[in-house]
Image: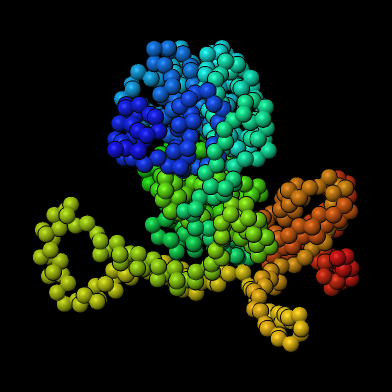
Amino acid sequence: MNAFEGLGLNENLVKAVTDLGFDTPTPIQLKAIPILLSGTTDFVGLAQTGTGKTAAFGLPLLQLVEAEKKYPQALIVCPTRELCLQICNDLQEYKKYARNIIAEPVYGGASIVMQMRALKKGVHIVVATPGRLIDMIERKAIDLQKVKYVVLDEADEMLNMGFRDDIDFVLKNTVNRESIWLFSATMPAEVRAISKNFMHHPQEITIGKKNTANVNIDHQYFITPAQSRFETLKRLVDFNPGIYGIIFTRTKADAQEITERLVKQGYDIEALHGDLTQQQRDKVMQRFREKSIQLLIATDVAARGIDVEGITHVINFELPDDMEVYTHRSGRTARAGKSGICISICHSREVFKIRQLEKMVNAQFHRLDIPSGKDVCRKQFFYFMERLINADTSNGDYETYLPDLQKKFANISKEEVLKRVAALEFHQFLKYYENADDLNARSDFREKRFDNTNGRNVHEKREKIFFRNDTGYTRLFINVGIKDGFYKASFLQFILDESDLKKEVVGKIDLREMNSWVEIDKTVAGKMIKSIDGKKYNGRLVRMNEADGGFKKTSGERRRIVNRQ
């Protein structure tokens, strides 16, 4: 007996999920479906992505809509085109034995005329992104007056993307609805406000603790100097042969730059960011789903709504500014009950963020050492040998060539053949990692002594203290600050534009009212000073120098630098 039968679903839906290989509901499905089948209860479901939320609301909707009434009875609003199409594909599979029910996707980046024609023919369920849905309402191409059920999927994502006004508009225009079903991975204040303003005594179900990450995810972090972030990324990718994952960056410029650098080095990788056209996005996603590319580099906005099975790793090239975004990033892996790994590349100053994340997602993060060059080579070598041993030789007429092969290798031992195979496969790889640097941020140990209350028994506790690699950074003083109209992002952009340097060389920025301090990679500190010192900003002469109290040569003369710390 299929356990879905006990939830109250009709025979056709149970048969469809059985065909899909589902016989046991996930926790969110088990709790949500019986409630939603009533059709009259407002509902809030808090659960991570990949936990089966689409079936949790999709199956009840398919049972509740009336096939003979060909107008929109249910509206599903979701943040992105990708998720919109994914939900429609899932509904298509669930209604395998109820073909007379029509679900139509409505999203930007496709012909609005074609979508209007499809709606005019008659549909039962509309799955829409907020922007295109508003367009349809304003063009009077969709009538929301008869919509009974409104589903807000990935509600926190939609609010993060700035769709609050759109959601309010939609809910104000579905005046005859019988219920709102809100699904979200997290419960920020704005999501709670929607529940308070538009829902009537909603029944709330939480799977796991609020804002927690998937328990099947192994959270790992690696500490490296800022200037070694890219090399660390490359090494972690090399250390995980067979990786199929998403690398997250903060900006589209970073996504594009990293992609170009890795592609030049022979990696199967594509970028997904806001500068791509919809056609380009579709092409990239198709290649990724087909596993024609191993890695996808994406910004948070571009990756929202991505639902791809089998992702083994999520890599945070940098930790997100908004800690809740981490939950959504990590949720791209370990879907449908599978396990996955979420890796974060950090600077030593970001360890406090890791501690915040541990508390927020209620999970332990494991600090690991960045593999050495020899470790990477060893991992790649044994991965190749495993593939060699398990190679499928049944689909080729290899027997035809066997006599020639045996003749050719008659005087060469098996060991020699293996060495030559390894040399052909790994020569460049071994050469690259032969003298690889240690990319781990410098750390040290200090001994602390603790006295008990009577002062007699003294024991020592070994405490690991992380230090910034002090030999790698110089602290610079600059005589501009908040009063000049700067905030951190604009200040960073200013010094990078003037010096033509990358942001990886910049450490901590201490922005004050009248002046500022900035940490910079020692190897390029002179270039930055030379580029900025003496320039004018808004009519003011800009001064930059080392903030160490020492002496520095400028314009042919030595002058004392006052330590303004």
Colour basis: rainbow
Relative to 23, 562 lies left or right: right
Q: Position of residue 131 (x, y in %)?
A: 58, 25
Q: Position of residue 523 (x, y in %)?
A: 68, 67
Q: Nearer the viewer, residue 437 or 440?
A: 440
On the question of residue 383 being in view, the answer is: yes
Quarter of the image that includes the C terminus: bottom right
Residue shown at 63%/65% (left/top)? Answer: 225
Residue shown at 48%/29% (left/top)? Answer: 36
Q: Quadrant of residue 160?
A: top right
In the rendered image, the vertical position of residue 422 relative to residue 493, given as above or below? below
Q: Residue furthest bottom?
A: 456
Residue shown at 54%/38% (left/top)? Answer: 205
On the question of residue 319 being in view, the answer is: no
Relative to 304, 285 lies left or right: left
Relative to 320, 552 lies left or right: right
